[in-house]
Image (cartoon, grey):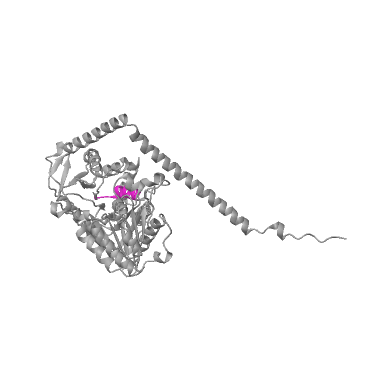
Amino acid sequence: MNRDDQSQQTLQLVRQLAEQALSRSAGAPLTAGNQVELLYDSAQNFPAWENALATSQDSVFIEMYIFANDQFGVKIRDILIDKAKSGIQVCLLYDWLGSWRAHLSSFFTPLIEAGAEVRAYHPPSLGGGLSMLGRNHRKMIIVDRKELFVAGLCISASWQGKPEKGLAPWRDTGLALRGPLLAQALAAFADSWASCGAPLDARWLQPAHTEPCGETAARLIATTPSTARMMRLDLLVASFARHTLWLTDAYFMATSLYLSALKQAALDGVDVRLLVPRSSDIRWIGTVSRTQYRPLLEAGVRVFEWDGPMIHAKTAVADGRWARIGSTNLNLSSWLVNRELDIALEDATLAAQLAERFLQDLEHATEIVLKQQRNRPVPTPVRREKRRRGSPKEMALSGASAAARQAARLGDMLGAVVHGSRSVESSEAPAFLSIGVALCLLALAVGYFPWLVAAPLTLLLASAGLSIVARSVSLYRAKRRKKQQLRQALPDVRQDETPPPDIQ
């Protein structure tokens, strides 16, 4: 075997190992033959949802963190009521915490009365225990078992902004998908549905069409508490990226492990960019995010803050070939505690579209820079370059070398056009001051009113204890029922035995 053949085999082996690592980390195989359309903001996502729901003929399955009692929420609810009355199977699973206002106002009662099945994920209960901390943060709609919508958007008018007050719509990203991946989406919904009651009838688990209808290969990553599938995939992508890694995140509070992965990628020459909100609907998260800027900037990661009211998208695009869209934020809550749902796309055309949109978003963002770098020239946005194709031998050796560098970086990790710039000091000072003052005030409050800590802790421990006791009681009952069934199944030996005949 010559060196060219060996290089080709080595490159093929590396690619197989990379694919195996991605599949195992995500807990999802790569599924080809899908048709995918990117949808931006409420202007494109909401009409697509409405049209699909209004024309549904078979079934509607919705898994949603926020289903709001507002103008848009009422519009969607009324569509679902009409469909349920017409005999279409309608199943809605909403998160209790995300939709608590709608829940307490009996917003879903008319939908239930119309014949729809409605369930709340993790409502308050004495037996909930620590599981109450985990929420269903997914945003998924399945229509007629043939069309799937996945997004960062919820069923809420908040995403439409407030034109009367001069507030622009929230910036967010979603997608519409048809194809073989629907089978995995239905299974993911059925798993969440069964976690809140009786399982979904098996006949609804079969997609309407199973044949390929497009050219996009995709993975559906449906995370559940403690699985960390998306976290492992995010780490791998940060390690495998060779040229670009552009991230948009609404609530960035990354772990030290992921921060290390981003820094190592930037130090290795990868163009790493992070776009986050300047003003957030959850202000304290933005404050914490700013405390993580400096180490990233020092490593060469470029950080941008959105100038508009809110950017809520959770997207990533790497090397113009790989992209991710969904509900997972880059923080521990999304990675380890919640139910989340994301679509990872391995399609150069869609990745290029998402990369182009990212560059457009940077035109409405402000770059955060280190003070000594304030006057540095702003790099030109990275575009896809046309590279000279070398001989098969050169390409194989180059690919194997790049793969080796990526593997080495993974080992290390585990052990633009912008609107303007602002130095990191102007972001750090108020962030650290806010956190420090908040901690001091909390310390004073606890010192004067110890019950502020004791009461929630007591309630949490009692809830966890009651949950464990309830679980043990149910296990004892199940054990007792099993014994009773066993006794009933066995014949009564004493009754069945016949006495031996008398011997004279």
Q: Is 83 in front, or is 338? A: 83
x, y (%) of residue 497?
73, 59
Q: Is 10 in front, or is 75? A: 75
Q: Residue at x 36, y 45 (%)?
A: 133
x, y (%) of residue 345?
29, 58
Q: Residue furthest right?
A: 504
Is 433 inside the magenta-drawn segment? Answer: no
Q: Is 384 in front, or is 67? A: 67
x, y (%) of residue 208?
36, 69
x, y (%) of residue 465?
45, 41
Query: In this orientation, does residue 388 appear?
Result: no
Q: How many marks?
A: 0
Left or right position of 127 against 399? right
Left or right position of 163 against 394? left
The image quadrant where one finds the N terminus is: bottom left
Left or right position of 123 against 265? right
The image quadrant where one finds the C terminus is: bottom right
The part of the image, by quadrant, that contains residue 481 is bottom right
The part of the image, by quadrant, that contains residue 91 is bottom left
Bounds of the magenta segment = 230-244
Q: Residue at x 33, y 35 (%)?
A: 452
Magenta region, main secondary structure = helix
